[in-house]
Amino acid sequence: MSRAHFNDLMKQVSQCQICAPHLAQGCRPVLQVNPQATVLIIGQAPGLKVHKSGIPFDDASGERLRLWMGIDQYTFYQAEKLAIMPMGLCYPGRGKSGDLPPRKECAPQWHPTILEHLPNIKLILLIGQYAQQAYLENKPKTLTETVQAWQQWAPKYIPLPHPSPRNNIWLKKNPWFEHDVLPYLQQRIHKHLR
């Protein structure tokens, strides 16, 4: 894929209006993509703060995710090393108990083409149930079971819970996550971001 094709794709993504009728805050795709990247984060969808800033994981979830990965903010935002592509590229809006799920039109529309332009990806972090349902075969029913079975998909994929502060209770109930998964995650991250 040529750089011109990539630039054209990114222009198309930035102008996407496929979900416009459903987005009260309007369309603002938020992602970080570079053909040289070796690590890819596939999350859910931007929150309101990220929608406003236009910077992926520019919130409390991002702070925790960087902590889990063992990297600083500077490294996290080096697009030539680390790509970020949520299941829904735009903020989906607010529901009764938090943000709405990612729009279903988005990933089928953009993920396959974007992935064609990321030939160097060695590690994919799948954050939350939507990314895990889309990318993991033979996935258990629950997020907890999926994250517990992380070795089934390693070393290419590592399923993670969402790093949101709303998941503090889950983290307290599942101490194995920090003891078993995070050391492996950090080792893989450092290997591929060198």
Image (cartoon, rainbow, N blue to C red):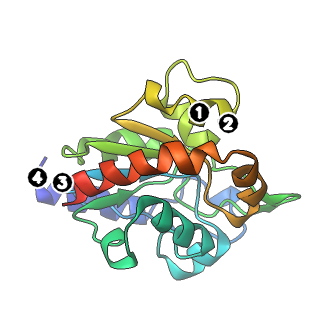
Q: Which residue is mark 4?
A: 2
| Distance from Cα at disc 4 to Cα at disc 2 | 40 Å
Task: Give the amino acid at mark 1.
Answer: Gln
Q: Which residue is mark 2?
A: 144
Going from the N terminus, do you reach mark 4 or mark 1 first?
4
Dot 2: what SS? Answer: helix
Q: Is residue 181 left or right of residue 32?
A: right
Task: Give the amino acid at mark 3.
Answer: His
Does residue 104 show up?
no
Q: Which residue is mark 1?
A: 148
Outermost residue on the bottom side: it is 53
Q: Is mark 2 in CB contact (under 8 Å) with mark 1? A: yes
Q: Is residue 125 above or below residue 67?
A: above
| Residue at left offset 13%, top offset 46% | 1
Dot 4: what SS? Answer: loop
| Residue at left offset 63%, top offset 50% | 102
Query: Residue 122: which quarter of the image?
Result: top left
Comparing marks 4 and 2, which lies closer to the viewer?
A: 2
Q: Is residue 106 left or right of residue 145?
A: left
Q: Badge 1: how crowded within 10 Å, few (<14), some, or many (20+)? A: some
Task: Give the amino acid at mark 4.
Answer: Ser
Q: Which residue is mark 3?
A: 5
Q: Is residue 122 above or below residue 186?
A: above
Q: Is residue 137 above or below residue 98?
A: above
Task: Give the amino acid at mark 2.
Answer: Thr
Going from the N terminus, do you reach mark 4 or mark 2 first?
4
Going from the N terminus, do you reach mark 1 or mark 3 first?
3
| Residue at left offset 20%, top offset 55% | 35
Outermost residue on the top side: it is 138
